[in-house]
């Protein structure tokens, strides 16, 4: 017996997002920049307001009622996020301000003098990333290699924008300490199958970190099933507020890591000579955290779970297929990245003849169509594909095929102005 | 006139499609390479001087229509000008670009560059228009130093 899939009602979803009813330059807003940041449903906005109006207080400090309620809301959000990504326990989720901070936190655990050998890094050791990383998964490792004398290596890309794993066994070897890889590319849309890489990393004893900035918001992500050691993600791309993100790590690894930022809340005991540290996740959460933002992220997770990550993923896959077909009808348009809906997300980069993406984006804006133009903090990808920049349309749970049509119409106008 | 026509004036599109003075040339006294890190646009620009007069501005680059057209206009305005006059016109253009559309440009001073008045209303695009102009200022300063060194040596 085959189960019938529930129909996805995008209009009902859209009704939850107040901003989607606004006009831009005299046209209905067509928001195709969710890879940069997602819009926020009323449920998240209400949660933020309710927190500030109802139980605002600092967390983990006071015995008073408000403090207790705020702490419960904050830790409740941690539990929701942990369940959302399949973490074994809430304490495996460290709140950060974004993915960038989460990746930097892990990078700073490595040093030549690390107590745990898994985090000891020096000349001769290697870190492996890929050519399709966001700058936030390049720079922390370049800086780490500069500090320690370790070597940074990377997977190349195939011509259709997939990870080139042909040299996997040579690239990930007994010198490799960590592989840090993007799950879904923010510029190519490529979804990486991390299975073979995780398996190889296990063979050689390397740790694996996944940048889930573009996967956690869009598809079911289960850290246990993925078999990785760390996952970075950010709240504002998954219907949550800005200023809140997370690092998931296997608990015993988090315990083995040194603290990151020093300050209040991350300590066990402090003397003027030395201090001891709290257990994870507190060890990594110095200072007053983004409390309301965490509560907002918890509401976002509830919202996404209510719709269902499988349903959202299916919707975006259909949209990607529809958009790839529609874009193929635009003369001189070249998709940078996978040209089929398989193994990719709903983020599509393209070049339109020789017309510069800034000009493409500007004309589309006059039609109310909001796309991102530039190198998308993934300049090596642009260099790899011989373009200075790309135009990128990115979809989410509220995107419609009508909006894809508006994009295609806008591109015709671009060709008229610059043709 | 719609908003986008305001930005993409016919003069700008003409300069973009048919750039003036494009290509790097010899001789030159100084060269500057500027990059817009947010979009990856680049320009390499050379300045040559003789007796405190700009004898050539040559350039090569890649970028959007605004950045390419502004390099073309820059070439057209600056070649043949005394250095002090070139700096005054550079200031006038920088003021126009910083004006958020509130500054009335003087066509006597800025020539075709008045067409960029509309760009000043788009803060995200001001850097595109200024890219070659900032490279020019940089190269001009270095060229002036070079010519002083050469002058004192002779």
Image (cartoon, rainbow, N blue to C red):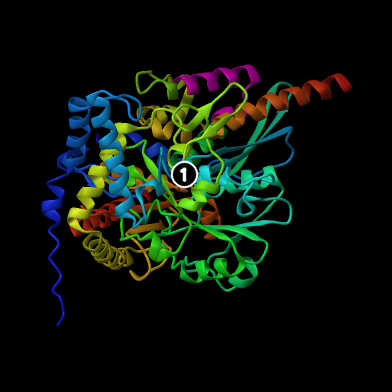
Side of A269 where A405 appears, left or right: left
Q: Quadrant of the C terminus of chain B?
A: top right
Residue located 74% across and 52% down the image: A123
Task: Work out whether B100 lies above or below A114.
Answer: above
Residue most extreme to the bottom:
A1
| Relative to A242, A182 lies left or right | right
Q: Which residue matches tag 1?
A: A102
Q: How many marks?
A: 1
B111 vs A259: above or below: above
Q: Looking at this view, name the residue that lies furthest to the right.
A: B154
Where is residue A396 shown, x and y percent of the image?
A: 26, 54
Subunit bearing disc 1: A
Residue A164 % position (x, y): 54, 69
Residue depicted at 21% across the width and 40% down the height: A44
Instruction: Give SS at disc 1.
Output: helix
**Hey, which quadrant is residue B46 in on the image?**
top right
Q: Is residue A39 visible?
A: no
A163 in the magenta segment: no
Relative height, residue A67 to residue A34 (above, below): above
Q: Position of residue B58 (x, y in %)?
A: 63, 39
Q: Nearer the viewer, residue B32 or A293?
A: A293
Residue A400 visible here: yes
Residue at the (62%, 43%) spot, across then down: A143
A239 sits left or right of B104 in the view: left
Quadrant, the N terminus of chain B:
top left
The segment highlighted magenta reads: B77-95
**Residue ID at (65%, 70%):** A170
Toward which corner of the image does residue A241 lie, by quadrant? Answer: top left
Q: Main secondary structure of the magenta part?
A: helix
């Amino acid at each position: 017996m085959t189960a019938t899939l529930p129909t996805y009602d995008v209009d009902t979803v859209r009704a939850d997002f107040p901003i989607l009813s606004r006009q831009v330059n005299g046209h209905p807003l067509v928001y195709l920049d969710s890879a940069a940041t997602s819009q926020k449903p009323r449920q998240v906005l209400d949660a933020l307001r309710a927190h500030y109006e109802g139980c605002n207080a600092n967390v983990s400090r006071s015995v008073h009622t408000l403090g207790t309620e705020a702490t419960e809301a904050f830790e409740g959000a941690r539990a929701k996020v942990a369940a959302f990504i399949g973490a074994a326990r809430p304490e495996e989720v460290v709140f950060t301000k974004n993915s960038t901070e989460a990746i930097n936190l892990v990078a700073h655990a490595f040093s030549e003098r690390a107590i745990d050998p898994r985090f000891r890094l020096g000349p001769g050791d290697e870190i492996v990333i890929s050519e399709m990383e966001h700058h936030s998964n390049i720079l922390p490792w370049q800086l780490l290699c500069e500090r320690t004398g370790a070597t940074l290596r990377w997977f190349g890309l195939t011509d259709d924008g997939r990870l080139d794993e042909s040299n996997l066994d040579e690239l990930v070897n007994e010198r490799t300490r960590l592989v840090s890889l993007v799950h879904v590319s923010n510029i190519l849309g490529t979804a990486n199958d991390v299975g073979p890489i995780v398996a190889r990393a296990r063979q050689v004893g390397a740790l694996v970190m996944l940048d889930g900035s573009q996967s956690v918001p869009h598809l079911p992500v289960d850290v246990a099933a993925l078999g990785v050691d760390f996952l970075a993600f950010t709240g504002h791309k998954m219907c949550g507020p800005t200023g809140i993100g997370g690092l998931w790590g296997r608990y015993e690894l988090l315990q083995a890591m040194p603290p990151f930022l020093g300050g209040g809340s991350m300590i066990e005991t402090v003397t003027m000579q030395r201090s001891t540290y709290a257990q994870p996740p507190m060890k990594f959460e110095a200072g007053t955290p983004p409390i309301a933002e965490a509560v907002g992220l918890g509401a976002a997770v509830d919202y996404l779970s209510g719709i269902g990550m499988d349903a959202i993923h299916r919707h975006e896959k259909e949209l990607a297929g529809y958009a790839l077909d529609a874009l193929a009808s635009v003369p001189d348009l070249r998709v940078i990245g996978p040209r089929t809906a398989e193994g990719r997300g709903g983020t599509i980069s393209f070049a339109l003849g020789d017309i510069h993406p800034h000009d493409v984006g500007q004309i589309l804006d006059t039609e109310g169509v909001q796309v991102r133009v530039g190198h998308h903090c993934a300049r090596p990808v642009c260099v790899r594909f011989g373009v200075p920049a790309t135009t990128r349309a990115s979809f989410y749970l509220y995107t419609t095929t009508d909006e894809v049509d508006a994009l295609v119409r806008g591109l015709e106008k671009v060709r008229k102005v610059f043709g | 006139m719609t908003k986008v026509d305001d930005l993409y004036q016919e003069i700008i599109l003409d300069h973009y499609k048919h750039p003036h003075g494009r290509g790097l040339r010899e001789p030159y006294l100084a060269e500057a390479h500027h990059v817009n890190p947010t979009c990856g646009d680049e320009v390499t620009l050379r300045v040559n001087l003789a007796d405190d007069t700009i004898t050539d501005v040559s350039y090569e680059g890649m970028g959007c229509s605004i950045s390419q057209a502004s390099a073309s206009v820059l070439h057209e305005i600056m070649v043949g000008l005394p250095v002090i006059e070139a700096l005054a016109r550079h200031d006038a253009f920088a003021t126009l670009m910083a004006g958020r559309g509130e500054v009335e440009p003087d066509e006597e001073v800025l020539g075709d560059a008045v067409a960029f008045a509309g760009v000043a209303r788009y803060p995200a695009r001001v850097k595109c228009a200024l890219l070659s102009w900032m490279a020019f200022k940089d190269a001009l300063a270095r060229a002036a130093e070079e010519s002083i060194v050469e002058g004192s040596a002779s």
